[in-house]
């Protein structure tokens, strides 16, 4: 039994991923503060980055892109609406669908987000070769897809 417990303890993959996520979130929060971006949390970043790439997205599609349930995305988007970074508009082709759109204030976040992303990636890949980086991305994507 002890040997099995030692084996489980040695395989700390999920533990390490969790620690990395916490450290990444702390870095993001520090960088958001250094850019005087209050009210935004790391989970808002997924939404904003998706909208930087495609400025008008239906709520359902946005939820798919960031891999969160629609009710979670709705709460996150509603906060971004209150902060003035996004707005919801009816889809001109189907009034039953709400589009989430960046406001000019939201579009103005892009340089800060690019800076924060650069710093985050530099930290993550600091001691990795290009090949190791590619392998890491491939392996994490494989784990994520199989979940």
Image (spheres, helix red, strand yellow):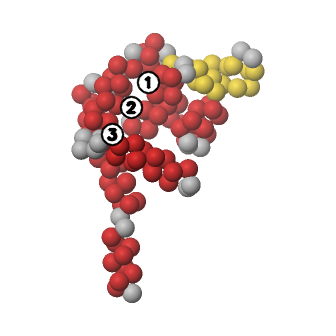
Q: Which residue is mark 1?
A: 83
- Helix, strand or loop for disc 3: helix
Can residue 87 be spotted in the picture? no
Q: Residue at x 50, y 54 (%)?
A: 143
Can residue 53 be spotted in the picture? yes
- The first of marks 3 and 1 along the sequence is 1
- Helix, strand or loop for disc 2: loop
Q: Distance of mark 3 from mark 1, alpha carbons?
A: 39 Å
Q: Residues within 10 Å of mark 3 (few under 14, many from 20)?
A: few
Residue 96 falls in image quadrant:
top right
Camera-side residue of 49 and 142 = 142
Q: Which residue is mark 2?
A: 40
Q: Where residue 93 appears, x then y in whole percent?
A: 75, 17
Q: Distance of mark 2 from mark 3, alpha carbons?
A: 32 Å
Q: Residues within 10 Å of mark 2 (few under 14, many from 20)?
A: some
Q: Residue at x 70, y 26 (%)?
A: 97
Q: Residue furthest front?
A: 131
Q: Which residue is mark 3?
A: 130
């Amino acid at each position: 039994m002890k040997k099995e417990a030692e084996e489980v303890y040695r395989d700390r993959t999920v533990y390490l991923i969790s620690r990395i996520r916490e450290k990444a979130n702390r870095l993001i929060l520090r960088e958001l503060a250094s850019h005087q971006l209050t009210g935004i949390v790391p989970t808002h970043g997924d939404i904003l980055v998706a909208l930087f790439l495609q400025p008008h997205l239906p709520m359902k599609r946005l939820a798919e892109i960031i891999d969160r349930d629609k009710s979670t995305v709705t709460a996150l988007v509603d906060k971004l609406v209150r902060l003035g970074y996004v707005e919801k508009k009816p889809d001109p082709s189907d009034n039953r669908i709400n589009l989430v759109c960046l406001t000019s204030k939201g579009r103005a976040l892009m340089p800060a987000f690019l800076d924060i992303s650069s710093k985050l990636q530099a930290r993550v890949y600091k001691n990795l070769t290009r090949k190791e980086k590619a392998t890491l991305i491939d392996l994490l994507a494989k784990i994520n897809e199989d979940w």
